[in-house]
Image (spheres, rainbow, N blue to C red):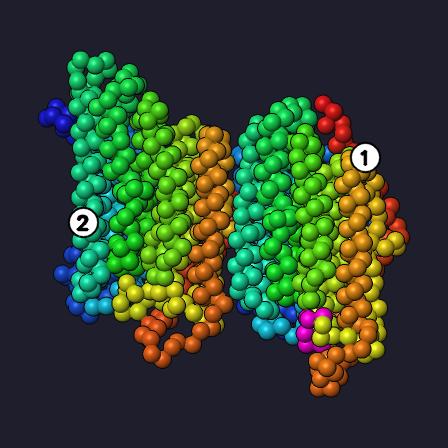
Amino acid sequence: MNLEAVKLAAANNSWGALFPELMLACIALALLVFEVVLPRKQHRYIPDLAIIGVAFTLLGLFLNFDSASLDSETFNGLLHHDHAGQVMRVFFLLSALLVCVLARVSLAKRAVPRVEFSHLVLVITAAMMLLAQSSHFVMLFVTLETVTIGFYILVSYFRTSAASLEAGLKYLVMGALSSGLLLFGIVLLYGAAGNPALPMHSANAMHYRDLAAFLAANPHNFVASVGIVLVLAGVAFKIGAFPFQIWIPDVYQGAPTPVTAFLAVASKAAGFAVLLVLARDVFASYAWLVIPVLTLMAGATILFGNIAALTQHNVKRLIGLSGVSHAGFLLLGVVAAASGAAMATGAVYFYLFAYLIASFAVFGVMTHLAGADDSDQELEHYAGLAKDNPFLAAVLAVGLGSLAGIPPLAGFMGKLFVFIAAFQAGARWLLALAAAGVAISIYYYFGWLKAAFFESLAPSPDGPARPERTPVGFAAGLALSVLALGSILLGFYQGPLGQWLTLK
Amino acid sequence: MSLIFDNYLLLAIAAPLALALAIALGLPKRWSVRLSYIAFAIPLLIALHCWWRFADAGQRDGYAFLATYHTGLGGLGIGLKLGLNGISLPLFVLAGVVGFAAGLYAIQSQAERLKIYLMLLLIMQGGLMGVFASVDIFFFYFFHELALIPTFIMVGVWGGRDRNYAAMKLTIYLTAGAMISLLGLIALYVKSGAHTFDFVALRAYLAAHPLAETVQGNIAGLLLLGLGILVSLWPMHTWAPLGYGAAPSSAAMLHAGVLKKFGLYGLVQIALPLLPAGLVHWSHPLAWFAVIGNVLIVGLITMAQRDLKQMIGYSSVMHMGYAFLGIAAGGIIGPGGVVLLMVAHGLSVALLFLLATAVHHRTHTFAMDEMGGLAQKAPVLAAFFVAATFASIGLPGFANFWGELAIFVALWKFSPVITALAVAGVVISAIYGLRAAARVFFGPSTAHFDGVAARHPPVDLRWSEKIPALVLLAVLFFIGFWPKSVTVPLDAALAPVPLVAAK
């Protein structure tokens, strides 16, 4: 951006449109201030302040949901505010709220700083909210890097655990590589669109609208196609789609469980919000390239995720790989959206919400079952859970059932919408593959439930002892009940949320 | 009162589900058990009342007791629309009757963790009432799945021998079948272009804009495969005997008796009027699979069974063959016979599973080689068992007879060879049925049975077992002697089929 554009951007600033992000940033800074100001004894209340702050931000967003700045661009086209952006804001705020609740349980088991954790979660959330609303590649890259750098720290947050450090290193290397790919793709697109020899070339080619106009005028430009593939590859890293899913099991296993949840749900959703806009709108005239690439990716992701998850015994790896398969189902929705199926966009958003509710229920149960070594969460540890703690077992059953897509739970509705959209788009073979994937996935989800419900195995005296289960506290118990009931309710009655998500 | 009558069908679905929710939220055991009687009785009473009043009730779009509720997906053409026509009425009654019998039996049984067991049964019961009351195809599928999940859990937790393996196999087979059926239904939704899951609207739309024959054939193929797995069409039947062998008796009664009929019901109610050419396209392969696979091969396998419960499981797979034959034969008589047979088979197989468990309580085994002479100790049980066997074979006087007769009549026009083979199957079923009754109840008692009888002197059928059995047998007899009560509305509902097909 040249100086003129910066001036324009400054003139076009409407900070009011960013009030949720600004509020999060202020709360994040306030947390650090509190840590300095407050006496040491009061420090344990600071993470709770973060939870309250996020809740109030969410409330403010709801009150202001149909705000005046909808369907307008601010900051000289860096951001575009629309309905989908509002939906994703709600999504990320909900994720942040739940991550903070899980962190209360999980971080208490280790001597680690807790205020900074909340601080990072809030900063990342604000960045993700901006990411979902960006309409300019500079904004996209800056917010994406903010998210990624925040996650570098969070993934290796348990500094004394070798697994956590290893995960952090792997995420760093893979994240840097993916950022490189994305940046290279952006540069190629910028270069191609800036070429004065071509029709519709633009000096402001980083802006989505200008780029889309350029691509529409040059539907078979080689440099632009390479750029598109590289951008898709960069995003595919974030969502963990094949062939960029290799980092997932190790990083998910090593990261602290709340961070795993944050990665699995919010980071993935951010990737999909970006991918939807790119595949459906910006790269629309390159559908001949985007749709086959995404189709191949979706098919391979569904197969890989489900088959690789079959043999896992560590639940964090298992949920990571099942998350890969969910990325595949969501990609199916993106393919449908790129092919122009009317309800595909709403279907993807509904799926994401169902996935959020179900995943956090399962992660919530996992944090209560984890011992001092957070990466060591085996299926065997779940034996007899139904007898010892029926509440956690019931929440686990609802969460896993929803992830598996069993009616009447919300996950089923998500899958149904995506499938209908995919059928409308004519992606028959992909759909057959997805159906097979669902049938395979039943095996490992069922295996997990079997461990929790059907096996009342006595721990063997020679083997390592099962970690002590954490009793369920009030806040976590409330959150888990709401999540479980939410999964059930959303399956029976989609009501306003269904209209809100599927009809727009 | 009108509030109740306007939401009659919803009440039948909601009553069991509401109690299940209350139990999940921590209702004490004493109250759970007491209220269960009511929650199982409400669907039965509503079903019987609907049956009684069906002729007088006003009909709209061919459905009586129509009611619509919005769930927020109106934009996609999905809404909870409940109603009964002549096809769904008998099955709705079947669900009410078998559910009541299974529920009564479960309440009286000394199952471990009885509260959770009842909760799962109640969910299943609510789902079953919903399956047959739904006019919306989406909810038809939805309620089926709702009823299916408790089956897996009940087999896995309360099951007998091999329960882990059986639960896993059941889950994978039935999920695969359900997924394929779902794809078929989605295909119907998208390809029809009507953008609605509402069956009435879909039927009207497709009557005006029929689908091309190849499209019909493809969708019908998907549905036949998916629903075929769910109804244990040979060679995808292996989950059934294993699952029923392991399942606790009430779950087996409800699944084999009612839930399994979902697939056939879907074919008769949805595929037949909407995809007539598609079903005709597949009718010959389907008929051969059914007659060679289900009727003859599985029939012979049934003869070789030594385990009473497995034998009943296999025999139910075999009888599903006749139902598929009726669908392949088409017309009005064929599908009409299928509906009659579904009801009759549902009642008789539920009765057989109940009695098999009663036998097990007295002999402590399911192996038929180790039984014998039980009739002297328990004559009433023996009488019930023989009656149920007769019904299952299809003797006149029982509802099964009319179903099989109608199917054979329709099948003769379709293919005399297949009819001859199918009739041969009846002989097979007579052999294994009567031989089982003879082995268990008559002849000299074995050393094993003497040993058990010495330790636990067998008593005859208790009232807690007699009442559910009596309810089932009474309805079997009633339809057997007065089939008109079912067939009159049934014919009216099936009549439009050839009209649409002719277009």
Q: Residue furthest bottom?
A: B454
Question: In this image, A24 relative to B441: left or right?
Answer: left
Labels 1, 2: front one: 1
Q: Label 2, on which residue?
A: A172
The kind of residue tagged 2 is Leu
Residue B246 coordinates in the image, percent (x, y):
61, 65
Q: Main secondary structure of the magenta part?
A: loop
Would you say residue A458 is visible in this rendering?
A: yes
Please state the chain letter of the residue tagged with numbered disc 2 in the rendered image.
Answer: A
Q: Residue at x 63, y 56 (%)?
A: B240
Within the magenta stretch, is there residue B398?
no
Q: Residue at x 23, y 13 (%)?
A: A199
Q: Residue furthest left?
A: A3
Q: Residue at x 77, y 66 (%)?
A: B436
Q: Residue at x 36, y 51 (%)?
A: A308
Q: Label 1, on which residue?
A: B413
Residue B311 coordinates in the image, percent (x, y):
70, 62
The kind of residue tagged 1 is Lys
Residue A65 coordinates in the image, percent (x, y):
37, 39
Name the residue nearer the viewer: A336 or B26. Answer: A336
- What is the secondary structure assignment of the residue under circle 2? helix
The answer to whether tags 1 and 2 share a subunit is: no
Q: What segment carries the magenta color?
A: B363-368
Name the residue nearer the viewer: B174 or A485. Answer: B174
Please state the chain letter of the residue tagged with numbered disc 1 in the rendered image.
Answer: B
Q: Quadrant of residue A302?
A: top left
Give residue B378's mark: none
Give the position of the N terminus of chain A as an image quadrant. top left
